[in-house]
Image (cartoon, coloured by chain):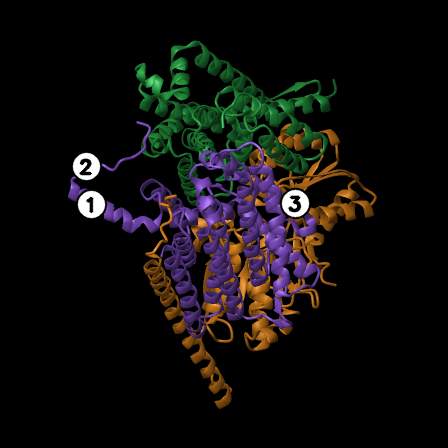
Amino acid sequence: MVIKGRNAAAIAIIVAIAAASPFIFIFGNDYITGTLTRILILGLLVLSVELAWGQTGMFTLGQAVFFGVGAYSAAVVAKDYGITDVIAILSVAGFAGLIIGLLIGAFLFTGRRVSELYVALFTLALAYAAQRLATSWSAIGAANGIPGIPFPTLFGLKLDSGPILFYLALVVFAIFFFICLWVVNSQFGLTMNAIRDDEERAEFFGYRRQTIQVLVFTGTAGLAAVGGGLFAITEGFVSPSLLGIALSTSAVLWVVLGGKGTFLGPLLALAILQILDRRMQDAFPQFWPIAIGGLLLITIVFLPKGIMSIPQVLRERKSQRVLRHSAPIREDIQ
Amino acid sequence: MKRKSMTVGSRGALRSVALLATVGLVLAGCSSSDTASETEAEATATQSETTEAAAEEEVDTSPIKVGVLTDLTGAFGIVGQSNQAVAQFTIDEINANGGILGRPVELVIVDSASDPAVGAQVASKLVNEDQVDVVIGGVASNMREAIKDIIATRGNTPYIWPASYEGNECTPNVWNVGAVPNQQVDPVVNRLLAEGKKTFFLTGNDYLYPRSVLAQVRKVVEAGGGEVVGEEYVPLDITDTSTLVSKVLASNADVLFEIIVLPATAPFIQGVVDGGFEGEIVGTLFDEAINGIIGTQADGLLGIQDYFATIDDTFSRDKVAEFAAAYPDEAGLFSATFNAPAWYRGLYLWKTAVEAAGTTDAAEVEKTMDSASYDALIGGPASMVPGTRHAQLTMYLGQMNADGSVTIIESLGSVVPEQCG
Amino acid sequence: MDASLTRSIFDVLSVTSILVLLVMGMAVIVGMMKVFNLCQGEFVLLGALTAYLTYEIFGSVLLGILLAPIMVGAFGLLLERTVIHRFYANPQGALLATFAVGLIIREGLRTTMSTQASPVPAPISSSWVIFGATLPVWRIVIMAVTVALLIVAAVILIKTSVGLRVRATLNNPELASASGVSRKWMYAWTYATGSALAGFAGAMIVPLQTLYPNLGFDNLITMFIAVMVGGLGSFAAPVVGAVAIAVPGSIMSILINPVTAQILIVLCAIVFMRLRPNGLLKSGM
């Protein structure tokens, strides 16, 4: 029942986006289409953070590293080797992400257990190092990045208009969205959650904690890298900021705002913020970055489960009023 | 096992409807305004077609749209706000003098937030949603790299890059109106070599612009019989330059050619000067805007730019005074390193090209812009050198003073860019 | 000894003392309290801002250096009582909340500043010539102050009853409160002390780095790496970590170049952190 409902929701979303899209192309323009395409692409990054952190408890503050690895490998393959076939490019990007993810995942999660915060700081330092490396590595354009990436092709057909690139992103997003749902709903997904909830107990019950963490981490790296590859071929450029701290923390921010542990919440938060972002930035250029910080702080303090928990919080408030409970219970130090 | 944190659950379908409703609403908000602008654009198009067909003397009076893309926020926010003011000032002036082709000019301003990924988005907005006739802007080179294809290639819209930069930008529809390395480097290095200063220490931040400029310095120094005794790069986010200062002091070079960007500029120069460096200190980033930050140690630094506030040119002085009166908040920031003269120049050169073409059509402007030339510019006359996509500029060698002002040592006249040959 | 060698040794000492000074506040908040305080860099920034403001208004940087620990300490106290105290049982929440606070401070300053960077002069701008090398006195002052602060901190933590109570509370909160120590205010004041130290460091170093919005953030990663290399659980470990990365870092900057040195240090630290997750000293994570 649960699984059915969730998949139904996902199918409903994808179908509805697909059904609504012709109207967007008729009434909108390449900028709006581009914004939607970007939401779908960043959606892959959000899914990867949610899988790693929300579902498996690996607090990654450097997921953009894999997004960037995918973007740069796609850029190099398309520009320097002249391979424009979209399946080939995304395979290369995803594969590059898997390899780097496997190396880092194995380094982090095999052997002695490390705490969530260690993972957080390690990945944060990694994002910093990766951006620094890309900024000074002249073979990949150093600080200027790689511009002028050619449009992708599919079976020899050139995918060179906004709507076509949008559908490309939609198809790729749909495929990976369903894979994510399938994984989370499988027996393997239960194991991921078990590790998230209590690593030691999961290990005690005989789950192979190390293997599962490495596998999930590698998988999410591949997923983020496919997103990066899509970014490179749809936007036509890559730059070092794609694998840095800013994008990594933004991805975590979307997950926090939307609600860690859900897929819909983070995707919704991403969509709202991306659409609002440009309008708000134009309306209040000076104050919007501060407002983002304020929004994050308020969410963490008052709505730790994100916007998806608003109905739940309201219901609890109501029942508490009825039961005349005075204060919410908190696990404070005092 | 209980899975309490999964909230998608069976209520997922309901939530997805809510999600769609929200996204739908926002999109509806976007597209309604776009529909409006598009209908307007279509109307304009139809109107211009019919007028052309009907009678040639009837004039199109719909506004010409100039897209301004700059970093109003983020690391380069200060520069971007100055750019915006200069663009507004220039366009107001053009409108006060009858616009372009008898049509008024209107600005569409977007904020690229010092982030190339944001820049790509807003560039697409300018070209696809606002359908501007030209885009001018960008502060750092990585911004140009991120937006140039979206504007010039995919968007087939002229793009003016108004900054001194590393060179080699030869994409069709892209017009470079700032100085390139040979324009800033050659005159000053040759002058120093002629004065008998033969040993050079080169240093800058680790990115393309400093590396390209310093490569040009090395070329000219070695061709002129001088010697490079040290070359060192530091990270962009360096906080302590003390080890670099020591290397410069130990080199005992006759000349330090440096391109260390803010915020490390001031600590670095102060360290070198206070440490007793006796040679000349030269840079492509020294002007009135930076002197104030360096402080009294700026005394004696040599800078080469396309404009200084003290140049002997009444037109420039009057214009900058007008600007200062109109934008008192940005008055102190009209300077070469803030690209202010290049923005003014770029807009006027494009105006000239449009008037020569008789239309804002990109293909026509691509032909006329190639040899556009204009004299009444801040910093002196400028002209595009045909076939190079770059501008021939009047350059000045200035010596910085402790009070932040600049003494002009030499007007170098018009210097030709060596680009896209 | 020749001038060049003197300068090199001086640079290593100077770079190290600056990092140690910056890390001390973090040693209290991250090392002792184990709060992953991502706005630590912004505490440094606020200290630098205090020095800048007293210079602009009263013409005295020294006044700012004296005021900075008080102002930033008070801010830390306020922040602990409003936000941080909610997250002692939820370290991830603390990390995200402090990231948000840092973002607000950083962007707030960016909005109000009218230049990209503002210089703040050193209270003492003269230089000493030692073995033919001209050495700035302010850097020597920072070395001396850093050493003095370390000694004071060690004496307070080891010899006084305040230090004993702080260590007891942080190591075993239940036992300490059973023995009559107010946990609530012990945590609050410890956090405030860590903030005050960061603010002081910011005011001390701003003459060498100028005031700019990313001043704190640019120093943050290095500070965190120092803490991770040193290890958690004590005041001393992060300080040792700071020395352990600043000395080889500055030597590599001198012998190779700053770009390679920076990347090598980060990579070595990352590998080291994995091989010895507990750091150079003691256990913790």
Q: Nearer the viewer, residue B93 or B135?
A: B135
Q: Which label belongs to residue A136?
A: 3
Going from N to C along the chain, the mark reached first, 3 or 1, is 3
Q: Nearer the viewer, mark 2 or mark 3?
A: 2
- Which chain: green? C
Residue farthest along the bottom direction in this orientation = B54
Foreground of the two, A98 or C153 = A98
Q: Quadrant of the C terminus of chain B?
A: bottom right
Q: Is residue C100 visible?
A: yes
Q: Residues within 10 Å of mark 3 (few under 14, many from 20)?
A: many
Q: On residue B192, which mark appears?
A: none
Q: Secondary structure at mark 3?
A: helix
Q: Nearer the viewer, mark 2 or mark 1?
A: 1
Q: Is residue B21 left or right of residue B288?
A: left
Which residue type carries mark 2? Answer: Ser
Query: Picture coordinates of residue B343 (x, y %)?
Result: 55, 58
Disc 1 marks a residue whose amino acid type is Ser
The answer to the question of whether label 2 and label 3 lie on touching residues, with beta carbons closer than 8 A, is: no
Q: Give, as a three-letter code, the residue at label 3.
A: Ser
Chain identifier for the orange-coloured part of the image: B
Quadrant where the image shows the N terminus of chain B:
top left
Q: Earlier in the sequence, mark 2 or mark 3?
A: 3
Q: Tell me which chain appears purple.
A: A
Q: Are marks 3 and 1 in contact (CB under 8 Å)?
A: no
Residue C67 position, x and y percent, is 40, 25
In 3D space, how far apart are the residues under numbered discs 3 and 1 (Cα atoms)? Answer: 58 Å
Quickly name the residue at label 2. A326
> What residue would you read off at disc 1?
A319
The answer to whether A142 is drawn above or below residue B268 in the figure is below
Q: Chain of mark 1?
A: A
Of labels 2 and 1, earlier in sequence is 1
